Image (tube, rainbow, N blue to C red):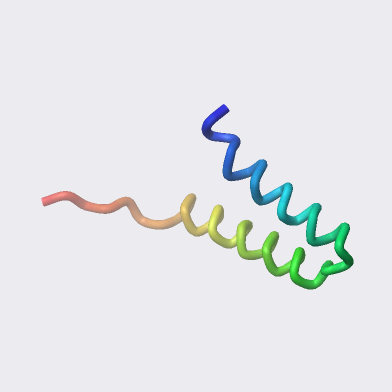
Amino acid sequence: MRGFLPWLTVLAVVLLLSALRLRALATVVSLGWLAWCVWSWVRPARRRP
């Protein structure tokens, strides 16, 4: 359940912003989350000396 907490938080924020008619801001939040997820998936692994 702990792994889903960030996803659920972002989903709740996007739904709240959409309900408040702030769809542009909701779009920015969701695209930012998507970009962070993709970056964390494809970034090179940190090398330890």
Question: Which residue corresponds to the image point at 63% horizontal and 57% vertical from the top-left?
Answer: 34
Question: Which residue corresponds to the image point at 64% horizontal and 46% vertical from the top-left?
Answer: 9
- Residue 32 x %, y %: 62, 64
Question: Which residue corresponds to the image point at 27% horizontal and 53% vertical from the top-left?
Answer: 46
Classify 27 as above or below 47. Answer: below
- Which one is nearer the viewer's eye here, 42 or 24? 24
Q: As drawn, which residue projects farthest toward the front?
A: 20
Classify 11 as above or below 26. Answer: above
- Residue 2 x %, y %: 53, 31
Q: As drawn, which residue projects farthest toward the left?
A: 49
Q: Viewed as shown, does residue 17 lie left or right of 19?
A: left
Q: Viewed as shown, does residue 15 lie left or right of 11?
A: right
Q: Viewed as shown, does residue 46 lie left or right of 33?
A: left
Which quarter of the rendered picture does the N terminus lie within?
top right
- Residue 8 x %, y %: 67, 41
- Which one is nearer the viewer's eye here, 21 or 30? 21
